[in-house]
Image (spheres, rainbow, N blue to C red):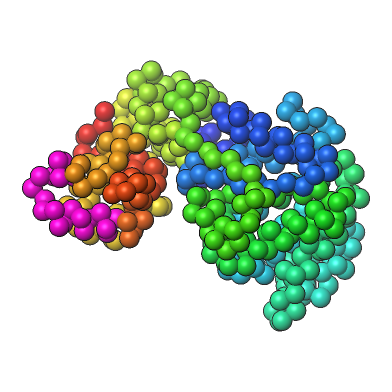
Amino acid sequence: MKKSSSFCPGMPVPIEFFIGRKKEIKAVARLIAQTAEGRSASLFIKGEQGIGKSSLANLSAFLARSDNSVLPRDKKLFSLHLYMGAVESLKDVCQVIVKGLFAAFQQRRLLGKARKYLAKYLESLRFDLFGLGLEVRFRKDKSLDELPLEFPSLLYHMWKLTKKASPHYKGLMLILDDIERACNIESFSPFLKSLMDHISSQYKEFPLLLVLLGEDSCLEKLSQHHPSITTMLQVIELPPHSREESAEFLTKALQSVNLSPEEKALEMMVSHSGGFPLLLHEIGEAVYWCDSDGKIDEKDVIDGLLMAAHSLGEKQFRHLLYRRIRDSQYRSILFRLAKMPPATFITIRLLKGLFPQQQSGKIAYFIKRMLQLGVFQLTARSKYQFSSQLLRLYLLLTYVKGGLIS
């Protein structure tokens, strides 16, 4: 029976399988060193869904807190990687961060001291039956309304406890991941700006590196709610991996479980991933389980692409493609467009050339509908592209079912 593969679809890539991103890693390392020297900073890592933002943040957190060859030992930060996917209010944002800090405290005496600072907000704080997990319950009254206002001071005092327990850390690296919902909260952007301003001016002995992860739309919403926030954020945009980087990752991950893909099979996997880490993992995982003889060949890859397309569709795109886009002709047009080069501009003229039998009115309505659903985005006057290359690649993968793989 096969053991677990080295692939982890939908999860940050393990440190040992991280490849590429050398320029981005150097940029993050500079900010970590700057923070360790006493200067707070803030960073926005942006990119499409599945491009590897969480994996880069995970590696950055590792570099910040652990011994490695990238950063000196005297420039270490205490790092927290927290997910904001379920927040609905600014109070929720603060509670997620507080819970993350509590969970990071390993000593009960530190928990007791931290609890004193948050006593008026907490209902209970206790370990589970086996002492492994920590349960934090907040009050459900109006006292929580003051939590965002007092948060800079509370965060500072929590940091002092951390520093006392681990004096080798020079500052805090706070990573807020999956912030799409948080960015819809109008007060989120002013809260972040106020937090950084307050800490920089009032708590100079508390260096903070704030790292936000999100798509382009998140940065736009943050700017809309507080235009000056862009002046404090440094931005790193993640492009897809190169073909060489994709091949390196797949080869390394397969070799770790004693598998070596044939050249053509590897090329097919690289081509259909489009350089997206999420797809590299989805395809790699599927191909791994489709292999039965220890040799990754073209048949294994074709079977794996079928499985990966089904898996990705069930998790992310099936609802959009088969429930919200009910017109089969519209789906046919999308499949055809997905086969074109990623940089292709979609125009009415292009669609008329591809589908001369379609009336101009229907083509215009098709574009309007795809914009409404978020499938297309306007990139120039009367020029459109897929809003998500991950969606385009998924559409491309579905062609496998019709035997149209190349």
Residue beneath the point at 61% across and 52% down:
230
Decide if residue 65 is on the left or right side of residue 369. Answer: right
| Nearest to the observer: residue 390 or residue 364 | 364
Q: Position of residue 63 (x, y in %)?
A: 72, 35
Where are the magenta residues, as a range? Answer: 351-370
Q: Which quarter shows the C terminus?
A: top left
Q: Position of residue 111 (x, y in %)?
A: 85, 61
| Nearest to the observer: residue 338 or residue 55 | 338
Residue beneath the point at 60% across and 29% down:
23
Q: Position of residue 350 (x, y in %)?
A: 20, 42
358 inside magenta stretch = yes
Residue at the extreme bottom of the image, as rendered: 141
**What is the number of callouts on the image?**
0
Magenta part mainly helix, strand or loop? helix
Residue beneath the point at 57% across and 57% down:
223
Decide if residue 279 is on the left or right side of residue 29. Answer: left
Q: Evaluate whether residue 365 shows in this view.
A: yes
Residue at the extreme top of the image, as rendered: 263
Q: Evaluate whether residue 309 shows in this view.
A: no
Residue at the extreme left of the image, as rendered: 357
Above or below: residue 318 compared with residue 342 = below
> Dividing the picture into quarters, in which one does residue 189 lie?
bottom right
Q: Position of residue 60 (x, y in %)?
A: 67, 39
Decide if residue 232 is on the left or right side of residue 393. Answer: right
240 inside magenta stretch = no
Residue beneath the point at 36% across and 51% down:
377
Above or below: residue 249 compared with residue 279 = above
Above or below: residue 108 compared with residue 123 = above
